[in-house]
Image (tube, coloured by chain):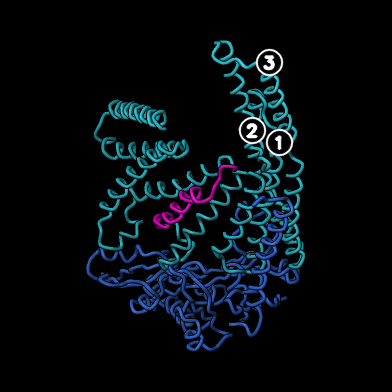
Amino acid sequence: MNTPLRSEAQRRADEIAIFQVELARLDEEGVLRLDPAQQQALREHHAALLASFAGRFDIDRDAQARQLSLGMRVASFLGALALAASVFFLFYQFWGNFDETAQVAILLGAALASLGLTVWIQTRDASGYFTKLAAMVAFACFVLNLTMLGQIFNITPTDRALLPWAALALLLAYACDLRLLLAAGICCVIAYVAARVGEWGGIYWLHFGERPENFFPVAALLFVFPQLVDHRRMSGFAAIYRIFGLLSLLLPMLVLGHWGYGSYLAHYDIEARSIEGAYELAGFVASALAIWIGARRQWPDTVNTGITFFVIFLYTKFFDWWWEIMPKYLFFLVLGLAAILILLVLKRLRRIGRGTVEGAP
Amino acid sequence: MKLTPWKVLAAGFALILLANAVALVGVYLNRSGEADSRMTLSQRELSMPWRGAMVRENSGLALALNWRVIETGTGEYFGSGFGANGGTPDWLDESRMVALGFDTAAVAADQAERRRFERQLPREVLLVLELGGPAWQRALERTRQNVARHEAALLANADSKEFAAKAKRAQEQLKREENANSRLVASDAGLDRAALRAKYPDRGRYLIVKATLRPRTVTRDKQTRIGGYLSALAVSQINVPHALRPALEPALRSQRRTTDEPGARFEATIAFGQRLEPWIEAVAVAR
């Protein structure tokens, strides 16, 4: 049997708790009653599993622990960001006092040592919070390492630096089961692919953001990736890939829906207004498709992202059409009615989805 | 594949060492062999970069490279002196813009085509910077003519405060041009480095650097022409090596630049290597 990750252990513990409550209810209602030997075996099995998980992963065993755990997650996230910033400013404060050899040695040493520290903490930190802090510092040290080498030796800025940063962030994310580092790695990948696409079009890489269509290839890549590589053991990883994939698709569409001149198409004698109209339509279709695919595949992350963007597209369109000409009470009434309509449609969609699941063989 | 701590450590170490090695080998290759250009610049071309609140805590020291674009059609105060570092040079015409990869077709047709031309995104080009050459000499001469014109006007209107102020301003501008303004002027651009170097073989007078070029139309006297806006250099600040800081730092921090006093007087030998990345080789401070 594979050794489970912390997230897997937490999920199993949650499922055990739900199962125990339901079993007690079935017992009360007389639907299912296990004999004493079976009850004893089940209790012992669950107790052994939970003790093993708790010993290794410091999982939340009840609701109160879960609430505290949420607070700890927030604290470790903020702490990780603050420590990463601290590393940057610490080096900036003192690097001028050393010669170039010492500067390189410090930068390289800090990157290696912080990585070593992260791996060491991971083997001892059952909760995972301290590992997250250390991993974020290791990532910051490596980013600082290459950035400062660029400054010390006057190296021409290049998008290729994003590749090793992405590689280290993804390595730490997969090794330590850290979604924060996964998001950092994905951001580096998004910037790199978009910069490459822009450069293939002949533009200087630092200006890749001025053509939002540069983000479309990486959007497809990110959305498809969790389908090609099994992520069932990594809790939430597939969802993060899909969310960033959708953001890379729908955000540029939203921008182009209001700024047709930013499109590559504007160079081919197409009116900016037509481009904006096309991207508004594409935005509605893409977010509706995201809701549909998410509902069919049972990906709540995809459904929620799709709904959010559908509502944004709809409301910005309402604003364009009616903000100037409608009395404000009527405008907001229309927004409210639109929200109710969306709720009704989603409710119906949920019923259809439930019917499909129940009807499945 | 299961990621054991040892595997993570080995992969991470390999990644960090490889990335550092690639960067440092690049530095070695840039600095090996004969430098692409090497020239001695003074405080006129090298200055302390602006230091914002966040950067004030930065203990490093870098010098910003001040270069100019001389624009003849911009009135008296053409060609900013302290290095505004950008502009639309007269020599950047339609044929050059085509050669640099921009689509200039049908620009003259109408306003919409001009906007379409200007919406093309910036490209990286090789920019030739000339030190104290004919372009700078012409700028100096123009400033002198400007002074003569304003002094003649003042003589003819001896009681006019307005003419007196203009003449004073022209004198100050000349003083800046003679003593303080950068002599490093953008004089050509291309994509083929070998061709540019063959055209400008003097490595002590012509720098070839990477810069960004954005398409721009210039309208003057109701005539619109195709041009380009030269902006940021790929490497705009040059780190001062630790060994050279004791000589340079007191001079840089002790004086402020004014019209009469151009600031600390120093000279620095700057080399641009095989990858057109600069470094400071030597510094001499005037006593």
- Between residues B247 and A149, which one lies in front from this camera angle? A149
Q: Earlier in the sequence, mark 2 or mark 1?
A: 2
Q: Is residue A268 left or right of residue A220?
A: left
- Quadrant of the rendering where the C terminus of chain B is positioned: bottom right
- Between residues A235 and A115, which one lies in front from this camera angle? A235
Q: Secondary structure at mark 1?
A: helix
Give the numbered dot on residue B206: none
Which residue was labeled with disc 3?
A: A36
Question: Amino acid under label 2?
Answer: Gln
In the rendering, what colour is chain A? Answer: cyan
Question: Amino acid under label 3?
Answer: Pro
Give the numbered dot on residue A10: 2
> Callout 1: few (<14), some (14-19), or many (20+) C-alpha neighbours within 10 Å?
many
**Chain label for disc 2:** A
**Chain label for disc 1:** A
Which residue was labeled with disc 1?
A: A57
Q: Contact, CB < 8 Å: mark 2 with mark 1?
A: yes
Which chain can be seen in blue? B
> Callout 2: few (<14), some (14-19), or many (20+) C-alpha neighbours within 10 Å?
many
Q: Secondary structure at mark 3?
A: helix
Magenta extent: A211-233
Question: Amino acid under label 1?
Answer: Phe
Which residue lies at the image location 65% right of the left edge and 23% below the top edge? A64
Find residue A41 and report its image quarter: top right
